[in-house]
Every structure is written in structure tokens, then in C-alpha cells.
Image (cartoon, rainbow, N blue to C red):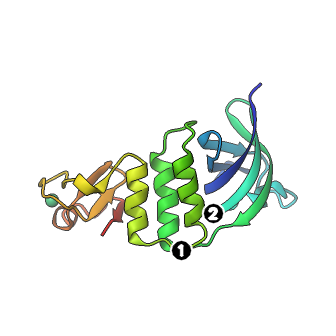
């Protein structure tokens, strides 16, 4: 049976069903893993408290009909800023599952110690395979687009984006 003990950054945590949670982790050794925590929302569950977004945890994950987090101890609490939350959400959406990436791991760890700036978002996109430097607007093909849409996996200029306001967007400059 698969069992892993690894450091992990908690990207996000969502409630699932009556008492379970799902955590999205970026782990040092296995890249992105989405794992279930059972009975996480019971008041007695000390485990879930360690898996708060932006925490770095030492996690033990086993495979039981998919990854299940069975143990976790928070090592440090990351600094919260709007930019950091956005980048964690991008990693949750765009990083490949179960693919170790130490460059991204180191970048995210550094990010948790400071306030994210807009250049960090561009760097994160680049590390995730969407380099903004040579990107063009997915609609009008103009160069230097200002916004990345995580839903479309495409860059847009401000003008084209305003025509489609419902998109989940990330301003890059
Ligand atoms: Zn455009």
C-alpha cells in the first residue's frame, strides 16, 4: 500500500459531505496531491486543524480509495496576503498531480515568508508552464496581455476581458 510522509504546503481546504474535508497539498516529494480527511469537521478532530490553508505541514498520506491524509503536524504558518492566496489557487488549478517539482516547492516556501507582489504571480505562472513574457491575448492576439484566466488557461488583454467579465482572472501587471 502506498504510504508517504512528506512536507506539504496546504493550498486549500474544502468541506465535503457531513464531516469530511478535502485538502489540496503541494508536497515536497510528490508534487500536488488532493487528499481526503475523514471526520475532519468533528470538534474532536485535531488533525484537521493542522491542515489550514497556507500552513506547511508534515503529512502522512496513505492510499485508501484515493489519497487519505491520516496524520499531520503543522511546521509553520505562512504569511497571508491576497497575492499569496491567488498563487496558491493557481497552483491548485494548474500544477500536475503527483509530479515532484522542487523549483516550484522552493518558490512557494519563499512566498509564504513574504507578501506576494505582482511579479511573483508572473513567476508562478511561468513555473506552471504559462510564461507571460511572450504571451498574447487569446482573443485579439495583442502582445503583453494584462490578465491570465485560470478557467480558459489563456491570457487576455484588459479590453477583451471586460467583454467577458465572468472569467476567473489573475492580473499579471
Ligand atoms: Zn485582447
Do the residues under discs 1 and 2 have CB atoms within 8 angstroms?
no
Q: Which residue is depicted at the point 51% across and 67% down?
A: 84
Which percent across, then down, holds residue 37? 74, 47
Query: Disc number at residue 151?
Result: none
In x, y percent, where is residue 125? Answer: 39, 54
Q: Residue at x 62, y 72 (%)?
A: 79
Of 62 and 45, the residue lying toward us: 62
Q: Is residue 41 visible?
A: no
User: Which residue is situated farthest in the right direction here?
Assistant: 44
Q: Residue placed at 61% from the left, 70% from the top?
A: 113
Residue 146, position in %: x, y?
25, 65
Q: For the N terminus, which image quadrant?
A: top right
Q: Using the image, determine if residue 60 lies above or below residue 173.
A: above
Q: Classify mark 1: helix, strand or loop.
A: loop
| Neighbourhood count class around disc 1 (C-alpha, 10 Å): few under 14, some 14–19, many 20 upward | some
Residue 3, image quadrant: top right
Q: Position of residue 34 (x, y in %)?
A: 62, 43
* Ligand 1 contact, mark 1 (Cβ < 8 Å): no
Task: Determine the residue positioned at 76% across, 61% down.
Answer: 75
Q: Earlier in the sequence, mark 1 or mark 2?
A: 2
Residue that mark 2 sits on? 54
Whether residue 150 is visible to the viewer of this picture, yes or no, is yes
Which quadrant, please, contains the C terminus? Answer: bottom left
According to the image, label 1 marks what residue?
A: 81
Amino acid at each position: 500500500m502506498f504510504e508517504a510522509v512528506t512536507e506539504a504546503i496546504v493550498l486549500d481546504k474544502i468541506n465535503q459531505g457531513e464531516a469530511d474535508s478535502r485538502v489540496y497539498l503541494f508536497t515536497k516529494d510528490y508534487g500536488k496531491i488532493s487528499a481526503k480527511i475523514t471526520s475532519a469537521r468533528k470538534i474532536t478532530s485535531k488533525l484537521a486543524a493542522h491542515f489550514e490553508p497556507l500552513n506547511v505541514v508534515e503529512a502522512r498520506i496513505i492510499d485508501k480509495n484515493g489519497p487519505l491524509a491520516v496524520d499531520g503536524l503543522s511546521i509553520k504558518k505562512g504569511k497571508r496576503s491576497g497575492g499569496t492566496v491567488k498563487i496558491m489557487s493557481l497552483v491548485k488549478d494548474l500544477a500536475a498531480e503527483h509530479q515532484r517539482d522542487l523549483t516550484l516547492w522552493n518558490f512557494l516556501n519563499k512566498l509564504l515568508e513574504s507578501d506576494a507582489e505582482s511579479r511573483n504571480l508572473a513567476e508562478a505562472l511561468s513555473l506552471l508552464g504559462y510564461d507571460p513574457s511572450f504571451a498574447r491575448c487569446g482573443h485579439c492576439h495583442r502582445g503583453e496581455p494584462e490578465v491570465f484566466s485560470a478557467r480558459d488557461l489563456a491570457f487576455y488583454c484588459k479590453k477583451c476581458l471586460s467583454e467577458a467579465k465572468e472569467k476567473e482572472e489573475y492580473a499579471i501587471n
